[in-house]
Image: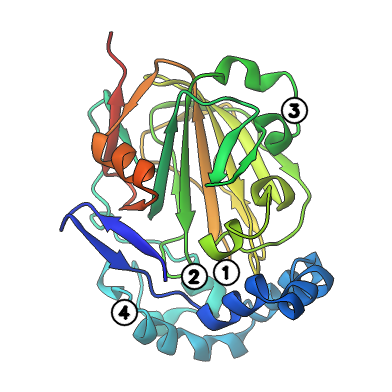
Amino acid sequence: MIRYFNRRTKNYNIEKVAGDAYLKWIYSSPLGMKFLEIIVKKKIFSKLYGLFCSTKYSKRKIRSFIDDFNIDMSECAIDYNDFNCFNDFFSRSLKKNARPINMNKKILISPVDGRLTAYEHINLNKIVQIKGFTYSLCDLINNNKTPVKFNNGTCLIFRLCPTDYHRFHFIDWGKCESYKKIKGDYYSVNPISLENISNVFCKNKREWSIFHSNNFGDVIYVEIGATCVGSIIQTYCPKKDISKGAEKGYFKFGGSTVILFFEKNKITVDKDIIEQTKKGYETRVLMGEKIGIQYEN
């Protein structure tokens, strides 16, 4: 059972997990773990399922997925009947007013819909994956030089589950460098997986780039694929002027993760998010909503 904090109601909600019984078997049983290592984590498994989700035959899954997970289609830019396949539905765009963006230059917004955990004053060699497991930023981005100035900074981890809006956006005005791809496996990023597999983020397929934010300093963006994520699609133009809230890219089918790294003394994360992280809970956030402010002495 996965509980997360709902900022609006101040209550804890239980997350309805797609393939819950399957995930528990795969990541919690000896036979399931063998199946995971031999087949599930492999690129071919996710690629084949991703290809199926791009065919017209996958369209029949859309209506039942909407009903099972109570997805609000009034936010969607087009009617569900107009999608050609499940991947089109999964990477759907929303209406312009569906995600209001706080345009105050001192306000830090969420780049995605998802469940957020936040860590301040991070040790670059011991970043928290989940209680008991840590990883290194150098290993995460496969780069030994870039991370130094992010020591003692802030790390924000956004977990997107399959029911979420799966496009990711920029948190500020600025310019973004070209992205770099890192090949890897396709483990789930669900908490069930994070509690049983060490260094998941450093093992999975991922892409990263440096965003030169006008108001929050340099920010490392890391997009991480997971089981059944066919692709990470970047849609932005590198080294061009970017507006706050502009789309950076999107994921095809599957749960996914976006991680942001900030330099020291650049942002102050909202207290409720920090408090819930310390208690061991993720906080549900929507793209464009306030999650912090510009750091002030």
Q: Disc 4 or 1, which lies upstream in sequence?
A: 4
Residue at the extreme right: 38
- Pointers 4 and 1 in contact (C-beta within 8 Å): no
Q: Quadrant of residue 53?
A: bottom right
- The residue carrying mark 4 is 70
* Mark 3–mark 2 distance (CA, rounded to whole Å): 32 Å
Element carrying mark 4: loop
The disc labelled 4 sits on which kind of residue? Answer: Asn
Reading the chain from its start, which is encountered first: label 3 or label 4? 4
Task: Compute the Cα span from label 3 to label 4.
Answer: 41 Å
From the viewer's perspective, tell me whether residue 227 is left or right of residue 250: right
Q: Secondary structure at mark 2?
A: helix
Q: Which residue is mark 1?
A: 253
Q: Which mark is residue 41?
A: none
Residue at the farthest top position: 297
Which quarter of the image is occupied by the C terminus? top left
User: Which residue matches tag 3?
Assistant: 143
Quadrant of res 216: top left
User: Disc 2 residue type?
Assistant: Phe
Asked whether 282 or 260 is in front, the reply is 282
221 vs 1, nearest the viewer: 1
